[in-house]
Image (spheres, rainbow, N blue to C red):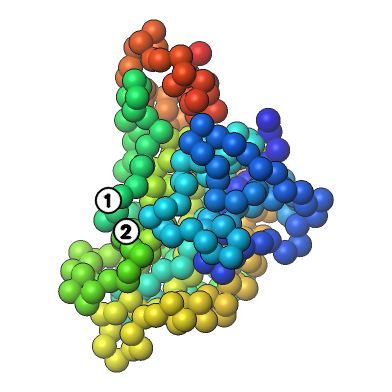
Amino acid sequence: MAEAKVGIIGGSGLYKIEGLSHATEVKIKTPFGNPSDAITLGTLEGVKVAFLPRHGKGHRISPSELPAKANICALKTLGVEWILSVATVGSLQEKIRPLDIVIPDQIIDRTFLRQDTFFGNGIVGHIPFADPFCPVLGDILYDCARKLGIRAHDGGTCIVMEGPQFSTRAESELYRSWAADVIYMTGLPEAKLAREAEICYATMAVVTDYDCWKETYEVVSADMVVDNLRRGIENVKKLMKKAISCLPEKRNCICCRALENAIITDPALIPEQVKRDLKPIIGKYIK
């Protein structure tokens, strides 16, 4: 079922896409449960897209409770090859200011409650993850931001914390000592699952605050995050539309062949139910 080329995962404050033509909602059931919400299919800048609000409409789902496996599986089932993720982040560096956009290229995983792989239950796979975001898509996003005159940062290391609480000052200073650039709660397991599904994945990260390390700045709160997100989201929408129109017809990056040599289980020993459940993910390699 090929319905869309690009998936858009909306973060806090982005629960619908304006300017989507021929829009229709679909509800997809996956072997991993239901996605966060109905997926809106339509056309944006002449490209077929699938929009999914990460936290559900009305922001009902906590970061630790997100059905990430169902979300990525549903987008893969729809034929999505590229995922543009929108997220709100806190800055860990003076030079990265509130309302800036960061296109990260590295992740440090500080989560501990989340299911972060499609593999297991009789099948073992080890994907390469040295570069957790698609470098091609990241370059497109940064180039488009530069052309639009949007203040953006090319690359950066993000901490993905469990949440839902914000950091302590000690944690924030620790992450700064690691030379991390931003911190948020939703980049994983999305990036890992997207790579396992051979989908190109990149994040447009809107900086809403300085986390809590900067003592001369107001302590981070949910109200601050939402207020700054409202101010920064217009740039995200412009960037998203521009980037979608610049995607190449064919992919030739590490993402589109991530499973080529990753599955090490003897196909004859993989349970048939697992093969059926993972068909959208592994069907190209395991029959």
Q: Secondary structure at mark 1?
A: loop
- Asked whether residue 142 appears in the rendered view, the answer is no
Q: Residue at x 37, y 72 (%)?
A: 90
Q: Residue furthest bottom?
A: 216
Q: Residue 8's x, y, as percent?
A: 59, 53
Secondary-structure class at tag 2? loop
Dot 2 surroundings within 10 Å: few (below 14), some, or many (20 or more)? many
Tell me the crowding category of disc 1: few under 14, some 14 to 19, or many 20 or more residues within 10 angstroms, Cα based: few
Judging depth in this view, the residue of 162 and 49 nearest the camera is 162
The answer to whether mark 2 and mark 1 are in CB contact below 8 A is: yes
Which x, y percent locates residue 6? 63, 46
- Figure disc tally: 2
Q: For the point 20% across and 64% down, which residue is it?
A: 178
Q: Residue 179 versus residue 41: which sits nearer the camera? A: 41
Mark 2 is on which residue type? Answer: Glu
Say which residue appears at 34% left-offset and 36% top-offset.
Answer: 128
- Residue positioned 44% across, 73% down in the render: 207
**Image quadrant in which you'd find residue 155:** bottom left
Position of the N terminus, as image quadrant, is top right
Q: Quadrant of residue 231?
A: bottom right
* Observer able to see residue 29: yes
Instruction: Give the labeled residue for mark 2.
Output: 162
Q: CA distance from mark 2 to mark 1?
A: 7 Å
Give the x, y percent position of residue 285. 48, 19
Q: Which residue is mark 1?
A: 112
